[in-house]
Amino acid sequence: MDRTRLEENWTNIREQMKHDYNITETSYNTWIRDLKLGPVDGNLVTVYVPSLNPMMIDYLTRRYKEPMTAAISEFMDETCDLVFAAPGEEPEQEQKEEAQKKSAQEDLIAQRAEKANLNPKYKFDTFVIGSNNRLAASASQAVAETPGDVYNPLFLYGGAGLGKTHLMHSIGHYILENNPDLKVLYVTSETFTNEVIESIRSGNAASMTKLRDKYRTVDVLLIDDIQFIIGKESTQEEFFHTFNELHAAGKQIVLSSDRPPREMQTLNERFRSRFEMGLIADIQPPDFETRMAILQKNKESQNEEARRRNQPPQDVDDEILEYIATNIRSNIRELEGAYNKIIAYSKLNNVPITLDMAREALKDIIYPEKAAAVTPKMIANTVCEQYDVRYSMVASRKKSAECVEPRQVIMYLCRKYTDATLDSIAKLLGKKDHSTVMHGVDKIKNDIETNSELRENVSQIEKKLGLVSQQENSN
């Protein structure tokens, strides 16, 4: 670890640690502020304590070692171990050896992950779980914890950009981190096909033996987009025997596809029966809350990276995240790409990140005909403007007529024009029970048929939000 760079960031690291772990000003000034950076030996960082009191060193170790280790690792973008010591003291040899052993083990795992073709960014802790992918995520975790024992094979399916590949890599990383002696291999079906073709083309037994040795001696085989081998006779045959040999030996197999086995019309029955003998788990497009969580995670990740590089974090309002999450619904890659485009647009044009700027930056992604998509907060603000009432009153417990009707109109429009859940709408309006939302939606639905004033108000709100043309186009 580079001590010079660590020294340059020492103040920022402590400040970030204070922020991330909610350390009070008093605790920070008492325990953290006066800590000095000592020697750095490989990945072992020594932090000097301004006291010879062994009780202080013991307290710091128990209370702050883990947060400070995490803060240093984030800023430096590499793992480390940490020890508190009085000035002039050196860490005990045992601690040095333990840190070196830990570092060597992490290096070995990283090398094996690279050899297994695993993306270092795709791990379980960076995967956002929602109602759309909960079964697939739980099954993947179970497979990673006990490879070969449950759900073998695990068959993940869903559209492009929904997280199948992320889960497959996560399984591989988890297994290597907890069982580094196991042999893990991730490949796409295209890679597998090309290697089979090359082995056949070479025309010698040694080449085919090498191929089989590569795929049939692993403990965990992960093959992405398996649907692309269908119809390729030689590739199918080689995969069939590879599957049988691994499964018979109790080795874990994980496959992904864009559709379930039963919908692969040209799939041979012997393949279908094998694909279905474990667990089939689908991944659906994420709902609004999951899309928001993905964007929040992306924002946090990028801001952490900025702090590591001693750069200011990007200030992206939730309103902008809501705009992205509302308009980009089907694909996580597009969702993250839209966020990255906003950040790049801001930097390249040296302009602050605002909702208007986001609309301009994403005009080639979010088309005019799709621009009518709105967020629950946008609906709430427009309704309050129409009824000339403050949002704080509508979101309060007040039951006066001036609050009740706009509150129920918000509920109605949120259900009609967004995919927000009843619980999230209730939360928006300061309610604990989603049954209140259901009642409000039903009341407006019924009253709008007979109450011309209500109907006119709702119509005006829809026009302000640009929803009228969208309705007409869908009719």
Image: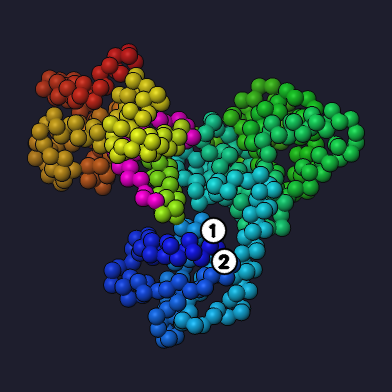
Quadrant of the snapshot with the N terminus: bottom right
- Residue 294 percent coordinates (x, y): 43, 42
Q: Nearer the viewer, residue 92 or 441?
A: 92
Image position of 112 (left or right of 75):
right
Q: Residue at x 24, y 40 (%)?
A: 436
Q: Residue visible at 81% across and 39% down?
A: 211
Residue 174: percent from left, percent from top:
60, 53
Who's the residue at 86% across and 31% down the image? 202
Earlier residue among tags 2 and 1: 2
Q: Position of residue 241 (x, y in %)?
A: 80, 37
The quadrant in which residue 255 appears is: top right
Q: Identify the element where label 1 is drawn.
A: loop
Tell me if label 2 and label 1 are in contact, CB under 8 Å. yes
Residue that label 1 marks: 78
Amino acid under disc 2: Asn
| Residue position for label 2 | 43
Q: Is residue 473 visible?
A: yes
470 falls in the magenta region: no
Instruction: Please report the residue visible at 48 percent of the width from the left and 74 percent of the height from the top.
Output: 38
Q: Is residue 90 above or below residue 101?
A: below
Instruction: Kindly state the secondary structure of the residue where label 2 is placed.
Output: loop
Between 40 and 98, the residue placed more toward the observer is 40
Q: Residue furthest bottom?
A: 53
Circle 1 packing at 10 Å, graded few (<14), some (14-19), many (20+), is few
Left or right relative to 235: residue 475? left
Tell me if residue 30 comes above or below residue 235 in the rendering: below
Please state, as top left, top right, bottom left or bottom right, where the C terminus lies in the image: top left
**Total tally of numbered discs in the picture:** 2
Q: The residue under label 1 is which amino acid type?
A: Glu
Q: Callout 2 environment at 10 Å: few (<14), some (14 to 19), or many (20+)?
A: many
The magenta segment is 311-333
